[in-house]
Amino acid sequence: MKRDMDLIREVLLQIEDGCDAFDYDEFEGEADYLEYQLVLLRDAGFIDAHLLDSSCAINKITWDGHDFLDSVRDPEIWRKTKDGAAAAGGFTVELLGELAKGLIKTKIKQHTGIDVQ
């Protein structure tokens, strides 16, 4: 199975909005796929969760998870981040986060004139 960064971002947004569990049975035909993305989120240290046979109980988004989500929250930043990663031919989660942060820094400079290093 492959990592689905769009779904990972969406799951983080849902958790931030208060979702504290994912019942795999609600995702007909996609349960294994969703479970795999949740395992990746937990393994990356982005969420604290208990993975059960038929569901995933979310305790919280970790500090690193919040940092990543904050860097890719804006839909325009997320689109440009994905486009940049695709143009490069590959990415890691860390590189996606750094690319998104770079785009945010550019946006800050455009709006404030301050060059954030």
Image: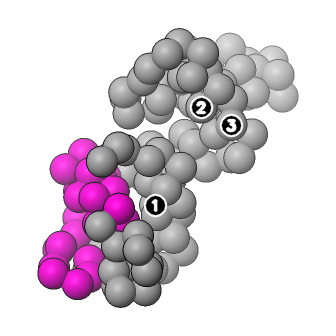
Q: Are marks 2 and 1 in contact (CB under 8 Å)?
A: no
Check if mark 1's residue and mark 3's residue have beta carbons within 8 Å: no
Left or right: 108 as drawn, with respect to 100:
right
Q: Is residue 112 above or below residue 52?
A: above
**68 or 38: nearer the eye?**
38
Question: Residue flagged by tag 2: what amino acid is it?
Answer: Lys
Q: Which residue is mark 2?
A: 82
Task: Point out residue 91 in the picture as x, y percentages from the top left corner.
Answer: 42, 23
| Badge 1 or badge 3: first in the primary sequence | 1
- At x 69% / y 29%, what residue is drawn? 80
User: On the rendered structure, is 27 left or right of 110?
Assistant: left
Crowding at mark 3 (Cα within 10 Å: few <14, some 14-19, many 20+): some
- Closer to the observer: label 2 or label 1? 2
Residue 115 in picture, x, y percent from top left = 68, 14
Q: Which residue is mark 1?
A: 12
Q: Under tag 1, what secondary structure?
A: helix
Against 98, is 62 above or below?
A: below
Residue that carries the numbered disc 3 in the rendered image = 79
Secondary structure, mark 2, is helix
